[in-house]
Amino acid sequence: MQEIFFFDQDESPLAAEDVRIENATVEPYPDGTRVRVMIVLTPFFEKPNLTLQITGPKGNTISEAEVLELITRKTELTMHLRSEPDHGTHTLSVSLYYDDNEPQDVQILSFATYQDS
């Protein structure tokens, strides 16, 4: 049976307590109702979880997602904004955690939505 490797052979998986968010980006779609989120983690052995939350300019939550037991370092997803987006700065919070523990790494990104004319 052939072995399947999820990581580059040059990278060593880290213990759960050392896993971090290496990079996170958010890119609004031109329709103003969705955003593309890309997250890259450090190599890991135990499968981590992510919580994603988008808040609008007034501080209201307009989208949430939970990604459980990741199997690859890179995660890409489209998040839909629940309400008509307010113009202004939105915030994406990405939290990395294991089990029911407190987040061990958090990244917060700001972005603005826009809509084609």
Image: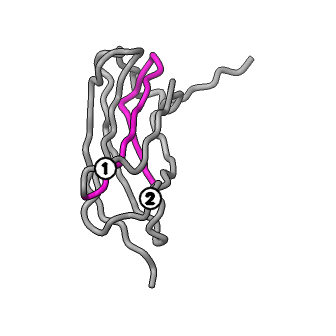
Residue sitting at x 41%, y 15% = 99
Whole-percent x, y for residue 31 in the image: 49, 71
The kind of residue on which mark 1 rests is Asn
- Quadrant position of residue 19: top left
Q: Which secondary structure lies at badge 1?
A: loop
Q: Nearer the viewer, residue 72 or 114?
A: 114
In the picture provided, is 92 more to the left or to the right than 8? left
Pointer 1: residues within 10 angstroms few (<14), some, or many (20+)? Answer: few
Read off the magenta span. Answer: 36-57
Whole-percent x, y for residue 59 in the image: 25, 50
Which residue is tagged 2? 83
Residue 16's label in the rendered image is none
Residue sitting at x 33%, y 33% = 95
Q: Are marks 1 and 2 in contact (CB under 8 Å)?
A: yes
The kind of residue on which mark 2 rests is Ser
Q: From the viewer's perspective, is residue 100 above or below residue 86?
A: above
Which residue is tagged 1? 60
Pointer 2: residues within 10 angstroms few (<14), some, or many (20+)? Answer: few
